[in-house]
Amino acid sequence: MRLALTLCLMLTTPAVAQETFSGAEFDARVSGKTLYFERAGRAFGAEQYFPDKRVIWAFEDGQCQRGIWFENADSDICFIYDESPEPICWDFFKQPGGGVSARAKGADPLNDLFAVHEDEAPLACEAPDLGV
């Protein structure tokens, strides 16, 4: 009986909403840092965040793209890269212990990115994207 009651409560209780970063919070959290992301437990890429909202994204194959980020009217964190002029918008979520995760707008949560490491070292990009 207790098990049935517990299952009923779990099914009827709304999921706890994840808290997203505002643009100012995101800036304070990532400025001057490089975050390394995984998807489904596998290395996905890294992004270096500069104090002026410039970024460099590095794919796992070492290819780098320069860009900028901004907060749009819907409070999404959006990126525009030199090679892709259309904005790519994300929700960045606050994780326990100060961690960060990200979900592309409209994407399945199974595709979330999780920052698994961060430091202040520049990315090792091949010329002309030297990451410094």
Image (cartoon, helix red, strand yellow):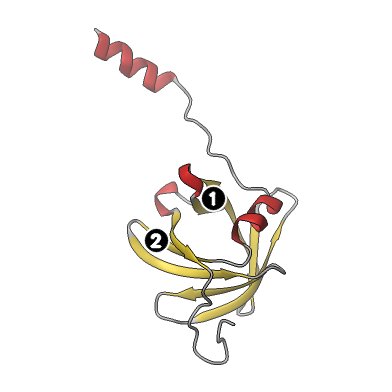
| Residue 62 image label | none
Q: Indicate the quadrant where residue 8 lies.
A: top left
Q: CA distance from mark 2 to mark 1?
A: 19 Å
- Residue wearing tag 2: 38
Residue 83 horizontal/vertical position (percent): 60, 80
Rendered position, 99 above or below 49: above
Rendered position, 6 above or below 89: above
Closer to the camera in the image, 5 or 22: 22
> SS at mark 1?
loop
Marks 2 & 1, CB-CB < 8 Å contact: no
How many numbered circles does the render carry?
2
Q: Residue furthest right?
A: 73
Residue at 50% x, 84% y is 125
Q: Please say whether residue 76 is visible from this viewpoint.
A: yes
- Residue wearing tag 1: 106
Q: Is residue 129 left or right of residue 22?
A: left
Mark 1: few/some/many CA within 10 Å (<14, 14-19, 20+): few
Residue at 69% x, 49% y is 75
**Mark 2 or 1: the one toward you:** 2
Instruction: Give amino acid for label 2.
Output: Glu
Rendered position, 11 above or below 91: above
Residue at 66% x, 56% y is 28
Residue 126 horizontal/vertical position (percent): 49, 89
Q: Indicate the quadrant where residue 49 lies.
A: bottom right
Instruction: Give amino acid for label 1.
Output: Gly
Closer to the camera in the image, 30 or 68: 30
Q: Indicate the quadrant where residue 61 lies.
A: bottom left
Q: Residue furthest front?
A: 120
Going from the N terminus, do you reach mark 2 or mark 1 first? 2
